[in-house]
Image (cartoon, rainbow, N blue to C red):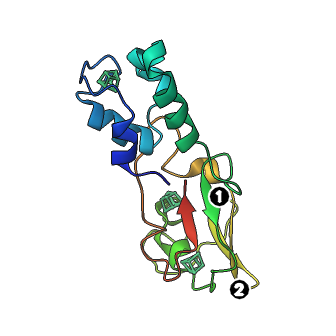
Amino acid sequence: MPTVMELYKLLPKTNCKKCGESTCMAFAVALLSRKKKVSECTPIIEEMFKKDREKLESLLLPSSGAGETGMIVHTELCTGCSNCVVACPVDVANDPRGAGTGGAPTNDKVIFRVVDGKVVASNIKECRRFGKNRVLCYACIDPCPTGAIEFV
Ligand code: SF4
Ligand code: SF4
Ligand code: SF4
């Protein structure tokens, strides 16, 4: 995954606000969290920025193995500990026993479940990183002891 600074360096850096963000740095942050698309920076369409635009778009392409939403679960690293299952707010909200039980919800609305000792992700479009009101959620990534969950 690129860094904010890598993305920022490829922007026009004029802080013109045409993208709806107050600065090019804020736009770089929004690009990284997939809240904005490169095309929303209208000055970068100019010929003089062609190489930078192409580089930006290539940096933001999903990596090999990423699903439509950008989540990669490295199952070879997963120990089946269930930390992500009980930490994901979507899973907690869909736990029929009520939030905060500390158990692993199992209905078909959850994102994570552990099957045969490995995590399986489904309903990925419910993830809070996607959709209109997306937020840069780290709730599944932070408690994973092996770094098995990645967003690209
Ligand atoms: S439109 Fe482009 S150049 Fe202008 S502030 Fe946004 S990112 Fe920067
Ligand atoms: S990023 Fe947040 S909402 Fe998305 S799967 Fe992970 S914990 Fe759940
Ligand atoms: S927190 Fe990590 S190791 Fe534990 S079940 Fe989830 S992906 Fe696997």
Q: Specify the quadrant of the image occupied by residue 75.
A: bottom right
In percent of width and height, residue 112 lies at: 62, 67
- Above-or-below relation of 48 to 85: above
Q: Residue furthest right?
A: 116
Residue type for callout 1: Lys
Asked if residue 95 lies left or right of residue 117, the reply is: left
Q: Of the two numbered discs 2 and 1 on the same chain, state the one appearing first in sequence.
A: 1
Instruction: Name the residue that disc number 2 marks.
Output: 117
Residue type for callout 2: Gly
Instruction: Name the residue that disc number 1 marks.
Output: 109
Q: Residue furthest top?
A: 46
Any mark on residue 44, and which?
none
Q: CA distance from mark 2 to mark 1?
A: 20 Å
- The residue located at (32%, 16%) in the rendering is 18
- The residue located at (63%, 81%) in the rendering is 78
Secondary structure at badge 2 equals: loop
Q: As rendered, which of 82 and 22 lies closer to the eye?
A: 22
